[in-house]
Structures are given as C-alpha cells and as structure tokens.
Amino acid sequence: MRKQALAVVARLPGVALCIMLAMAGDALARGLGLPLPGAVIGLIAYLAWLRSGRGISWAAPGAGLLLRWLGAMVVPALVSVADALPAGGTLLPLLALLVITTLATALATAFIYRWAGGHG
Amino acid sequence: MVEPIAACAITVAAFAAMRRLSAVLGHPPWASPVLLAALLIGAGLWAAGIAPAAYVAAAAPLRWLLAPAVVAFAGLIHGNAALIRRQARPLLLAVGGGGIFGLGIAIGGARLLGLDGTLGLALTTKTVTAPFVVAIMDRVGGPLGLAAALSVLTGVIGAVLVPPLLRALGIRDAGATGLAVGVSSHIVGTDWLTRRDPGAGALAALALVLVGLLAALLLVPLWPVIAGGPAH
C-alpha cells in the first residue's frame, strides 16, 4: 500500500509539468497567433530543458505514465467513427482510400530512409 | 446522460484489459488494444442502448490529456538522442518526403474518388496525429470531430497492416520501421511499436511530431486553396 502510494506521488510532478507546459504553450500559440498546436511548443520547451542538462529527472515517471496511456486517450475518437462514417456508396471508396494511402505513405517513408542511407 | 468519470474509467479499464490481452498474445499487430477497446466499448454501448455520441462527449477529459501526452514525447525523443543524431539526414529526408507524400495522396486521392465537401476536408489531415488535427482544424475552422475520427482510424489501419507489410518486404530495422509507422500510423502505431521496441518507438514518436509540424506549417496557409478548390 505504502509502495503504491509512493509510486503515485512519484508520477505527479511529471504529469503536472506536462499539463502546465501544454497549457502555457496553448496560451502562447493563441496570444501570438502561431499556426502551431500549443502542445508542440510545450514539447519543444520540455526537450530544450532536457537538452540543457539542468536535471529534470523528477519529471520522467509522470511523462512515462502519460505515454503509457496514450492509446486509451484516442479510444473515444475511434468509437465516434461509427457515427462519423458516411452511409452507403461513399463508405467503400473512403475505406479503400484510407488503406491505400496509409500503406503507400509507410512504404514511401521506409524507401526514402533506405535511399538516403539510413540503417539500423 | 453519461457521467464523465464513468466514461473515462470504463475507457481506461477496457484499454488496460485489451493491452494485457495483447501482451499475452505477444503483441501481434492485429490485436491493437485501441481497436479492441473501441469495439468492446461500442458493443457495450449498443447493448446498454447508449448513443456513442453521449459516451464520446462524456469521455472528453481523456481527449484533453492528449496535449500533455504530446509534451511527454520529449522524454522519449531525448532518451534516443544519440540514435537520432547518428541518422539525422536520412531521418529528416524520410519524414519530410514521406509526410509530404502522405498529405498529397490523401488530398489527391479524395478528389480522384469524388470524396468532397466536409469528408474531403477532413481527409486532408488523415496522416496527422490527433492532437495536431484538433489544433489545425481549430485554427482553420475545419471539420474537427470527423477529422480526428479519420486520423485515429488511419492509425488503427496502419498499426494493423503496416508491420506485416514491412515484414513481407524484408524491412526489419528499427529505423525504417519506426519512421514508416510514425509517419503513416501516428499515435496508434507508435503506441504499439513503443511497447514492442522502445528504440523504434522513439523514432516513430519523433516522426509523428515532425509530420504534425510540417502539416501545421503547410495546411494552415494553404487552407483557403484546399477548401476553396474544385472540391466545392
């Protein structure tokens, strides 16, 4: 019980930091009219902080927690697909387009990487 | 009326159970926890006679957490900085080229198949990860809900189909796999890959963030052309 309580406490600072950076980024993007999502500005700020080597290891457990549950956060959007998909004749071309473009994009990316000398 | 706390708790519980199932099965691509959890919840809503829209509205706090989760990707990228630095040139070329190709064929394909109007506009961001879709559509006034749904559906399709396709073509290295999954299948694919291979997952995370940036920088200024083109 004590161990679990400690694990929760260890994750709070990182979660709080990520929330605050996302909100600050949002305020900045809105204030300056930037075409960027606020969360990206938060990501860049967090990355710059990490790269500066000024010690931010206390945030790692919380950041890891958010990433581990990323899948759960997009489940509602997938459930809403049932309502969002068009009925009738448009459905099949739409699904075909989604499958073909997704596979083609993956292959294009992998081949460009190889062509440009990427490995490992 | 669905209570937000109940909708979020059920979503997290369903996802946790399906992730456990996926781990027991050895993380096969077809057992995507996101897909299985959505099917489980969809079936539950249908059995209980609850409209999916009521559940989706109640689960809004989970969507809100997507923004802090994007921030958290910084840790994953930083942890793999050495790998990224070693491969900077092929990495940027692959993500830039693959990302522009993905945006282009989505827009071109929609025109070609006559998928216009709101659906056509929502398809422009199919290769962009959900939090960026929300931000871009919010900014240009596009169809936010439909675009986010198509983005996640794309991620599921990619997470299920891209790994077997790459394997069939003999592409097994972390670099090509990570970038291909990140650019084409963004969050759902990256979530799956990170559990299987953290190094490849970090490259996928970097790729989805860079494609999101590229899309925001290209689509926001080009939106009047896309929305006002022959599709309307």
Image: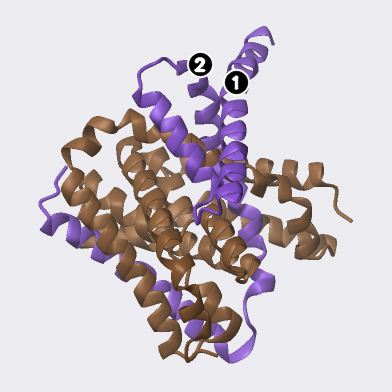
Chain colours: A purple, B brown
Task: Choose the circle earlier in sequence order: 2 or 1.
Answer: 1
Mark 2: amino acid = Trp
Q: Please, is residue B221 above or below residue B205 in the view? A: below
Q: Quadrant of residue A19?
A: top right
- Residue in the image at 63% along x and 82% along y: A86
Residue B167 visible here: no
- Count of numbered badges drawn on the protein: 2
- Residue in the image at 41% along x and 54% along y: B213
Chain label for disc 1: A
Q: Please, is residue B85 above or below residue B63 in the view? A: above
Most extreme residue toward the right is: B1
Question: Which quadrant does the N terminus of chain A fall into?
Answer: top right
CA separation, marks 2 and 1? 7 Å
- Left or right? Give the position of B84 relative to B154: left
- Left or right? Give the position of B6 relative to B81: right
Residue A43 visible here: yes
Disc 1 secondary structure class:
helix
- Residue in the image at 23% along x and 57% along y: B94
Disc 2 secondary structure class:
helix
Checking the image for residue A58, the label placed there is 2
Most extreme residue toward the top is: A2
Mark 1: amino acid = Pro
Give the x, y percent position of residue B80. Answer: 30, 32
- Residue in the image at 55% along x and 52% along y: B131
Proximity of marks 2 and 1: CB atoms separated by less than 8 Å:
yes
Q: Quadrant of residue A102?
A: bottom left
Give the x, y percent position of residue A62. Answer: 55, 26
Give the x, y percent position of residue A60. Answer: 48, 23
Give the crowd class for mark 1: few <14, some 14-19, many >=20 residues within 10 Å: some
Q: Circle 1 sits on which residue?
A: A13
